[in-house]
Image (cartoon, helix red, strand yellow):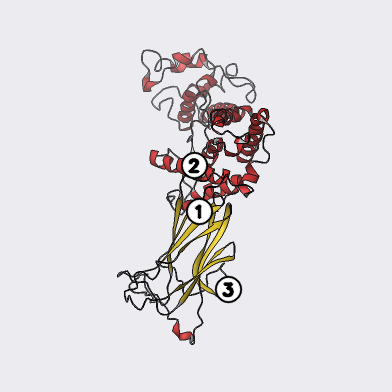
């Protein structure tokens, strides 16, 4: 409120454009102290406390002064001595320019949200770029809530339940990347949408087929796996469209694995077990693979045999299938014990070299971590970045007897949790010494 006289008294005002800090102490004592001293503190403002400090020492108070001057609220209208319109405009502009210059030289955005988690889309892209794994993360993480068409509003705190889901996802992703087989066979269930038509060819599948799906599956290790297929059923648990003989093909990386024949059992008219034989075990290499399940298309004699669906919201009772359709695919394994996967894209990306001897293990680990952190942070890794990974490595390396224990070091788990679980945008809270601009 007092800065309206800065222009009128150049000795106490701004010399040029921000050449020196203003010294409004005489003006405070003459026009403001009567209402804003230690005893009265009108409006909760105590100017006695800042008389000996330069203006930039109390930016929060000066911001209020600037606002009052610009709105012409201070000095109060009933005061006998008030500045002219030109003095109001000039003093508030110069004082604001002073703090704008300070804010430009030393920005202070105040407190921001400390953490922003990745959306499922961002999470998938991150692990693909960092670890060469293309996973269907919708099976690992909950759906992102959307607002006004945006699903990347992920600022704020993480609930314990959601954080636990991210940690579990990171553990699974890191094991797949390093190539550590689970201690017991693990299963994955894929269900196709109920309203998905499987009467025609599906894009991306071999020609001459109908329905089915292509599944990108990461096999953690080379070994024996089992696949089981369940067909779509109606409300009475009868297999839909099972009339006559149908052939079901399974392919791995576009190479045939198995062909099943599906047909109704004439001895059992209910057809409840017509798909019970759709399971078998096969050998799969370690790494990402494409698994295809689809029906061999049967030529029709007349085009009219394919009926158009009833034009309404999908309902399984209104839209009976004319041909069998795949409902569920279950992949389980590995059943045979095998060492860590060798030669996968993820391991080639992470482990660009291995230690030559025991003395080379820690330098090798440091080099591997540096490359991984560099790709994640898009800058060279610093010594501070390497503290936690190397400490974690030292604590866990003794668990593996082999001299190449780095192949199975679980420190990769920490890295995945660090920059794939959440996008770290934690900023240190700076002291409130500058205006918030």
* Label whose residue precedes the other's in the sequence (3 or 2): 2
Mark 2 lies on residue: 171
Crowding at label 3, few (<14), some or many (≥20) Cα neighbours within 10 Å? Answer: few
Query: Is 195 rendered above or below residue 182?
Result: below
Q: Residue 125 shows which numbered tag?
A: none
* SS category of the residue bearing label 1: loop
Q: Position of residue 346 (x, y in %)?
A: 61, 47
Classify residue 263 by image quadrant: bottom left
Mark 3 lies on residue: 207
Crowding at label 2, few (<14), some or many (≥20) Cα neighbours within 10 Å? Answer: some
Q: Is residue 192 visible?
A: no
Q: Position of residue 88 (x, y in %)?
A: 51, 29
Number of dots carrying numbers = 3
Outermost residue on the right side: it is 356
* Label whose residue precedes the other's in the sequence (1 or 2): 1
Q: Residue 136 shows which numbered tag?
A: 1
Q: How far separated are the C-alphas under marks 3 and 2?
A: 38 Å
């Amino acid at each position: 409120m007092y800065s309206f006289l800065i222009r009128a008294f150049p000795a106490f005002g701004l010399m040029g454009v921000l050449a020196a800090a203003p010294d409004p102490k005489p003006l405070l004592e003459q026009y403001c102290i009567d209402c804003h001293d230690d005893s009265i503190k009108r409006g909760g403002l105590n100017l006695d406390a800042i008389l000996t400090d330069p203006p930039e020492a109390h930016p929060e108070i000066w911001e209020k002064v600037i606002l009052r001057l610009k709105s012409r609220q201070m000095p109060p209208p009933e005061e006998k001595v008030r500045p002219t319109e030109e003095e109001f405009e000039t003093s508030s502009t110069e004082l604001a320019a002073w703090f704008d210059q300070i804010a430009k030289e030393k920005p202070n955005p105040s407190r921001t949200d400390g953490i922003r988690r990745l959306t499922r889309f961002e999470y998938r892209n991150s692990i693909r770029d960092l670890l060469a794994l293309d996973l269907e993360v919708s099976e690992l993480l909950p759906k992102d809530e959307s607002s006004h068409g945006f699903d990347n509003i992920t600022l704020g705190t993480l609930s314990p339940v959601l954080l636990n889901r991210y940690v579990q996802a990171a553990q699974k992703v890191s094991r797949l990347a390093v190539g550590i087989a689970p201690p017991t066979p693990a299963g994955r269930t894929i269900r196709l949408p109920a309203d998905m038509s499987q009467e025609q060819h599906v894009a991306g599948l071999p020609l001459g087929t109908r329905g089915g799906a292509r599944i990108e599956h990461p096999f953690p290790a080379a070994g024996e796996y089992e696949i089981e297929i369940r067909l779509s059923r109606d409300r009475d648990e009868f297999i839909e469209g099972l009339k006559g003989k149908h052939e079901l093909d399974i392919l791995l990386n576009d190479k045939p694995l198995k062909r099943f024949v599906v047909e109704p059992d004439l001895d059992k008219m209910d057809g409840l077990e017509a798909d019970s034989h759709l399971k078998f075990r096969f050998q799969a290499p370690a790494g990402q693979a494409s698994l295809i399940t689809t029906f061999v298309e049967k030529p029709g004699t007349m085009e009219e045999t394919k009926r158009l669906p009833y034009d309404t919201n999908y309902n399984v009772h209104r839209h009976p299938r004319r041909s069998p359709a795949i409902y569920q695919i279950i992949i389980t394994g590995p059943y045979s014990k095998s060492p860590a996967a060798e030669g996968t894209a993820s391991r080639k990306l992470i482990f660009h070299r291995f230690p030559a001897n025991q003395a080379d293990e820690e330098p090798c680990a440091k080099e591997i971590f540096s490359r991984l952190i560099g790709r994640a942070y898009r800058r060279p890794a610093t010594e501070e970045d390497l503290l936690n990974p190397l400490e974690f490595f030292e604590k866990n390396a003794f668990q593996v007897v082999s001299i190449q224990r780095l192949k199975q070091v679980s420190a990769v788990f920490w890295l995945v949790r660090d920059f794939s679980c959440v996008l770290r945008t934690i900023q240190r809270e700076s002291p409130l010494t500058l205006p918030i601009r």
